[in-house]
Image: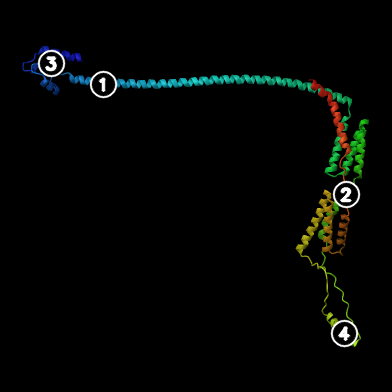
Amino acid sequence: MTDNNKTSGTDKDTSAPASPTGKETPSSSKQSGKPSATDKSAAKSTPADTPASDKNAATPPPANQEKKGSNKLSVVAIVLVIALGGGLYYHGHQQSQQLTANITALTDEISSLKSALADSEKQSQEAVKKAVQDTQVLIEQQDTTIKSLQSALADVKGRRPNDWLLAEADYLVNQAARKLWLEHDVLTATTLMQNADQRIAELNDPSLTPIRQAMAKDIQQLKAVKRIDRDGIVLRLNSLQQEVDKLPLANAIMPEAEEVAPQKVSGNVDDWQQNLKASFSDFVGKFITYRKREGDVVPLLTPAQTFYLQENLKAKLDQAVTSVYRENGRLYAESLKTAKDWAERFYNQDADITKSFIATLTNLSQQTIEVSYPEALESQALISDMLADRLRRDLAPLQTGENNQ
């Protein structure tokens, strides 16, 4: 573009020379067109003797300024493009580095996990292998123990085929002791001891003679224990409870009045005052009677008091029943004594049912409910020791075999 302008200017210089007055020829004005204000100012500032080529050379500055402006814009655009490209490149480079670092970390983590998994798998395999070996050893030991037990059991059966009778006798003796001390059932305890003695007699073993002697002594002691008919006593007390509501109440009870000797009229005239007083007292006594009494007066009971009396009397009899089973002689005697006192005080003593009630209470209060039991059964310890000793002797060969293994 610059070269074309320069060529056109040269052509102008060759085609039309400048006039001496510095004015352009018509041909040059026609070719270049109407000059601008800038050209005019440049022409004014140019000397008159300057050739036409100098005038034409001063005309291009506006085009250079436009080129400079466009060049600046181009440079700015290029700089922006380069900056944007650099930013994008830098951002992409940073992301690439971050992704590379993440991939490296994940790769390391996967490698460590694979290593840990391999170690864990190896340890698990070793543990399983060791467990299998231990189990096999244990199974072999168990097989050996079972064979030893079977051998020992066969040996025991061959030597003492009836030792189970001794164990049964020991069980019966223990049951007898439990019945005696926990339930105070002497009859059942005696029967169990006799059955145990029969089991030992069936063994026909002379070494068990001391045990049979101790059992005979224990059986004799049990037979000597006083038998108390607890059920009979309790049934009689229950029947008395049912009769309480039928007992007739006594009327108001008053103490006996003092007997006053009647005054007699004397035949002496000097005793006229006493005779007059005696006659007056005898006359008044037929209308008004005054008696002097000393003692407590028992009034009639109200219905509520009667109900409470009956319930309290039943409670005392029930307390006596409990004392029978607990063998509490003191509480038993106190309960019956209180019941008897209430019956004699508040009920009609002339009624036959009251007399029978009080007589039954008196009879029951004379019963003994406390029993002295043997402190221990001598045969219990002997038979337990004998059974344990035989068991140790029978298992001794088995324990020796296990120790040798």
Q: CA distance from mark 4 to mark 1?
A: 177 Å
Can you say whether 314 is above or below 181 in the image?
A: below
Q: Is residue 388 visible?
A: yes
- In 3D space, how far apart are the residues under numbered discs 2 and 4 (Cα atoms)? 72 Å
The part of the image, by quadrant, that contains residue 59 is top left
The residue pinned by badge 1 equals 72
Up-down relation of residue 124 to residue 307 (above or below) = above
Q: Is residue 169 visible?
A: no
Q: Earlier in the sequence, mark 3 or mark 4?
A: 3
Mark 3 is on which residue type? Asp
* Label 1 element class: helix
Sequence order check, earlier mark of 3 and 2? 3
**CA neighbours of label 2 inside 10 A, class few (<14), some (14 to 19), many (20+):** few
Circle number at residue 54: 3
CA gap between label 2 and label 1 equals 137 Å
User: What residue lies at 20% left-to-right and 19% top-to-bottom?
Assistant: 64
Q: Are marks 4 and 1 in contact (CB under 8 Å)?
A: no
Q: Residue at x 12, y 13 (%)?
A: 13
Q: Residue at x 80, y 56 (%)?
A: 314
Frontmost residue, 36 versus 97:
97
The type of residue carrying mark 1 is Lys
Residue under label 2: 229
